[in-house]
Amino acid sequence: MRSFKWIDAFVAGVVLLLTLTFLFYDNELFRVLNFLVVPGLIILHMTYLMGRKQKQWWEIGLIGTAIDHLLPQAIRHWGTVGALAVRAGGRGIGKSQKTVVFKVLIGLVASLPILIVVITLLSSADGVFDQYLSGFPEWLNQLTFTPGLPRIIWMFIGGILLFGYVWGYVQPMQYEAEKRENAHWKNGERTPVLRGPFRLDPIIVGTMLIVINCVYVMFVLVQFSYLFGAGEGHLPVDLSYAEYARSGFAELILVTGINFFILIVALQFTRPSGKVGMIVHQALLLILVSCSAIMLYSAFMRLNLYEQAYGYTYIRFLVHAFMIFLALLLLIAGLRIRYTSIPLIRWYIVLALTAYVAVNYVGMDRRIAELNIERYRQTGNIDASYLASLSADATPLLREFALNEYPDLKREMLERQAYLERDTSNRSWPSYNVAKHRAELEMSKLRTE
């Protein structure tokens, strides 16, 4: 059995922390994302632990194996449930009796299409018979177990799906191509061909880096003419703060993303060369990383200017977080250029999961409210409607702001209370949320003040 590793505890901690966000936070975006991310992480880690193909946790092939267990391996075991049920129900029954039961089941299934056609024709021919059939669903609704019937059906379907998925790990299917491959190797009909990993020629990669870096260096030199003075008003001619902030922001982020792809390919898939070639390769990559960092800083500053002019929102906050994440990726890439033993992909995966958990727990709604309130104190501008639309995570701060500094926000907050009360009326205990409960207490205080 595979020994316990640090990645097991790390993934378990990530899953636990993301699951707890459903209890402590009220952000709808992360609620939807975590509804997908948490099962995805569990499926990937189960495949890493028990998959039919042994894959390392940083290998891209792990995703393919996980999909194989989720779909083909699981679907083929749906019938296993029926087979086990028949086997369990058939204990103590003779062979001839089993044959009779099997034939009866075949007769029932075969009669269904005929029944559908016959009942449809008879209902059209006789109105009284049609009325009796129409009353059949009402008769079902009068049964005491009917309210729980949908849940029973969903439990039954979910149980079959879960059984098929788990049983795919217990008895995985081996494909015919794999069987033939193993048979050839076993009988010694051919010897295995050891193929090394795919590698690019260092001269080709170096030429591409030189051409790309020339363009980037030229762009950076142009940026330096006004980049560090834009915050003090030294903008290019005929550009306002808003125009400067908008111009090229998305393009800079896209170019930075392309640079990451180039970095990963150059670092992971370039064939080693001599000592001089390695030094030149590292120097070209460091230039690429430096230019990418300056582009990222330019985009970061443009977004800051835009937020100062128009306020802070979900999208702008998430873009800020993403740019900080890109900066950390650049830092790791720079270290990898200098220290070639650093496992780049593994560090990126761990950093990505850590960053995602961090942005879940940073309290995005409250932070957006704090930044907009600070902007109001500096400029006198604020969007009260947008603040009131923030989730329950920001309600305590907004209530305090409405009472002490901006009374016009109180009306918006009271409308928010009506929404929360409607939401509470249909809430059951499994959907209890700390942030919503705290917001309800704050809103009840606001109404009395």
Image (tube, helix red, strand yellow):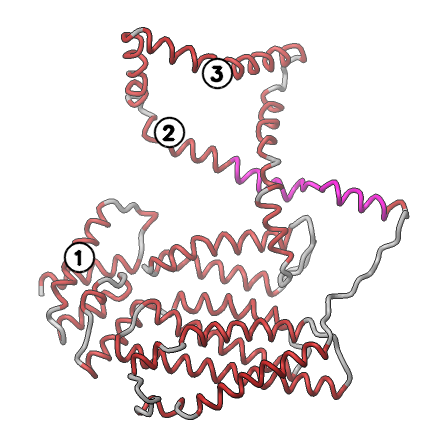
Q: Residue at x 53, y 70 (%)?
A: 351
Question: In the rendering, at what x and y percent does residue 228 appear?
Answer: 39, 91
Q: Residue at x 41, y 79 (%)?
A: 299
The disc label shown at residue 417, or none:
1
Task: Examine the residues drawn in magenta and state their main secondary structure.
Answer: helix
| Residue matched to label 3 | 112
The disc labelled 1 sits on which kind of residue? Gln
Direction front: furthest residue: 238
Q: Residue at x 15, y 70 (%)?
A: 402
Q: Residue at x 65, y 42 (%)?
A: 170
Q: Secondary structure at mark 3?
A: helix
Quarter of the figure that contains the C terminus: bottom left
Q: Quadrant of residue 371?
A: bottom left
Highlighted range, magenta = 160-185
In this rendering, the label closer to the viewer, 3 or 2: 3
Question: In the rendering, at what x and y percent does residue 255 appear?
Answer: 50, 75
Label 1 crowd bin: few (<14), some (14–19), many (20+), radius 10 Å: many
Q: Is residue 189 left or right of residue 279?
A: right
Q: Secondary structure at mark 2?
A: helix
- Per the image, is 81 magenta? no
Q: Is residue 419 left or right of residue 341?
A: left
| Residue matched to label 2 | 149
Question: In the rendering, at what x and y percent does residue 2 appear?
Answer: 68, 56
Marks 1/2: CA–CA distance? 35 Å
Q: Secondary structure at mark 1?
A: helix
Q: Nearer the viewer, residue 439 or 175?
A: 175
Marks 1/3: CA–CA distance? 54 Å
Q: Quadrant of residue 388?
A: bottom left
Of pointers 1 and 2, the one earlier in the residue sequence: 2
